[in-house]
Image: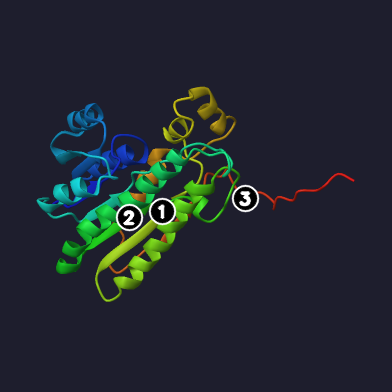
Amino acid sequence: MSKTILITGATSGFGAACARRFARDGWKLILTGRRSSRLESMQAELGDAVALVLMLDVRERQKVQAAVQDLPQVDVLLNNAGLALGLETAWTADMDDWETMIDTNIKGVLYFTRALLPSMVARNSGHIITIGSTAASWPYPGGNVYGGTKAFIQQFSRNLRADLLGTRVRVTNIEPGMAESEFSQVRFKGDEQLAAKVYEGTEPLKPEDIADIVYFTVNLPPHVNVNTLEVMSIAQSWASLAVHREKP
């Protein structure tokens, strides 16, 4: 009997790559996204693997709750929907951008997790996977609220594990570093030149790399729980601590 994975933000990047990876091995897919044309394209591409598509915004709590009520059994929830907006300093950033990141990266994860977790606990089986970021642990200029949202996800995942002790429900937070997808295009609001510079001269992670990691994590023996998995391209590492020096 095939298992079912629900993927939020399934129409591009990590979400689309994960949908293709799981479909290849016979999983049933429930795909969510805000763009109907892309959902239709994914459905046409993946055919019978797609059990259901849900056009919704993860920020809309009531719609999430209504959509989840009548779903078939979900074995894995992949909280993938998320975004970064802008690289401005905290005192010049757009407050609307901040709220969008908080509503999507935090509240969207909370809504889907809270909606699906009771059924997983009731049957004592399931897996909550969330796409976090290295920004949760390693700050950088302009990453103010984005990094804060991913730090929340990191700690939320840990606390879920604490709550679920004694059950067979697993929780994993996967934290990619620099990865080439639509992420930077969204961050820079469609400026493709600016987005391309982020990856110039590097070999970044690809969505397919993350899809393979998600698939590996899900298919470990059921007693094995990967709590947190931080992954970077070999082209990326940590910088030395920044020090501001006043000129004499």
Amino acid of disc 1: Ile
Residue position for label 3: 238
Point out which mark residue 174 bears. Answer: 1
Q: State whether residue 137 appears in this view.
A: yes
Q: Residue at x 80, y 48 (%)?
A: 245
Is the residue 209 above or below the residue 65 in the image?
Answer: above
Give residue 17's quadrant in the image. Answer: top left
Q: Are marks 1 and 2 in contact (CB under 8 Å)?
A: yes
Pick the front one: 147 or 235? 147
Amino acid of disc 2: Ile
Which secondary structure, mark 1? strand
* Residue 203: % across, % down: 53, 36
Could you tell which of marks 1 and 2 lies nearer the N-terminus? 2
Outermost residue toward the bottom? 166
Give residue 44's quadrant in the image. Answer: top left
Amino acid of disc 3: Trp
Distance from the alpha carbon under mark 2 to that under mark 3: 25 Å
Could you tell which of marks 3 and 1 lies nearer the N-terminus? 1
Count residues near mark 2 (Cα–Cα under 10 Å), then give few for <14, some for 14-19, many for 20+. many
Residue position for label 2: 129
Count residues near mark 3 (Cα–Cα under 10 Å), then give few for <14, some for 14-19, many for 20+. few
Which secondary structure, mark 2? strand
Give residue 229's quadrant in the image. Answer: bottom left
